Image (spheres, helix red, strand yellow):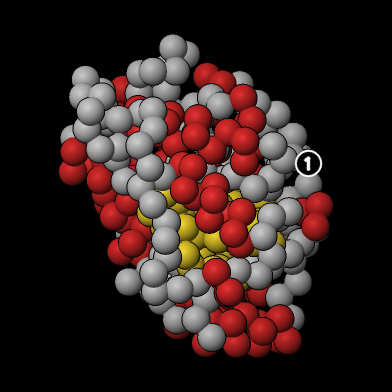
Amino acid sequence: MLLLMACAGSTPGDSASEPLPLFDAHIHLPGQEGDELLDLAEAGGFKGLFVLGPASSASLASAEDPVHGFVFLENNDDAELVLTPGLLSSVRERLERGAAGIGELSIAHYGGGDPSGSAANEADDEGLLALYDLAGEFNAPVIAHLDYSETTHEAWQAALAHNRDTRFVWAHAGDTGPEVVRAHLEAHPNLQVDLSCRNPVEAFAHRPYSEEEMSIAELDRETLKPEWAALLEDHPERFLFGSDIGPGDRNEAVEDIAAFYRRMLGQLSPEAAAAIGHDNAVALVE
């Protein structure tokens, strides 16, 4: 069973209190077996997981351990993902067998942070629209990686508006700022946002953004930025915690990642912290 473990990052000012429950809505499964994944979850004190691949995670799910496998569609090196009828049929079959959602779907993933670099797909191309419709049919959330820029804006807006029955989770808060995220949330009621990667933990230092741009914390690494705090308090039902461990050496940082987000969420109202840390993820797959 996934256990809630005591670790750093409890509510500020009350070191004896039970740590904030966290449900990891963004974790990957390359290079480790299911037992190792559950060990990582235990180290972080995670009470549940959305497993986004690339390996199959169907065997991990059980009634005792709230582990939810998502359909992962591979497009190596951010090559274009071609949604053929056969591939869509395969996705349908996996959703029928109980997959919780689709993701992480790499739509526009700029390895260097430059919109002129490689991008997988236009967010509103015909094949992806068919995939979104399929997800809406099954009430299955789509966790999408789309690096926000002027280049991706128009197609992303069209994708979100295409089918309001399709629920999207914008991975890594779009690698953009709180004002852009706020505008998207207010325009698209079917959108939620995960906070994975938006931290200063060294395992994420290779990403093509400065700590000041990427982290939801001030440079002291202890204080939640006021603009993020205001957004999270205004829309607590629209955000999810995620670790994004799996790639590279991030697994070794799981306790640091969990502690950081507990510190940040501990600066919000208890209701907002509980919703973002745990409850929204549970509600997404109920």
Would you name the residue on which mark 1 appears?
Answer: 117
The kind of residue on which mark 1 rests is Gly
Q: Residue furthest top?
A: 220
Residue 167 in percent (x, y) is at 42, 66
Residue 165, by quadrant, is: bottom left
The answer to which of 77 and 132 lies nearer the viewer is 77
Question: Measuring 80% from the left and 57% from the top, which residue is drawn there?
Answer: 76
Q: Is residue 148 above or below residue 86?
A: above
The picture places residue 77, in percent across and down from the top left corner, at 81, 52
Q: Secondary structure at mark 1?
A: loop
Residue located at (42% from left, 65% from top): 65
Residue at the location (32% across, 71% down)?
286
Label 1: how many Cα within 10 Å (few below 14, some 14–19, many 20+): few
**Quadrant in which the N terminus appears:** bottom left
Identity of the residue drawn at 62% across and 41% down: 251
Residue 252 visible in the snapshot? yes
Residue 49: percent from the left, percent from the top?
A: 47, 58
Q: Front-most of 17 and 71?
A: 17
- Examine the rendering and report whether any part of residue 183 can be seen: no
Q: Where residue 90 sits in the image (x, y, percent)?
A: 67, 84
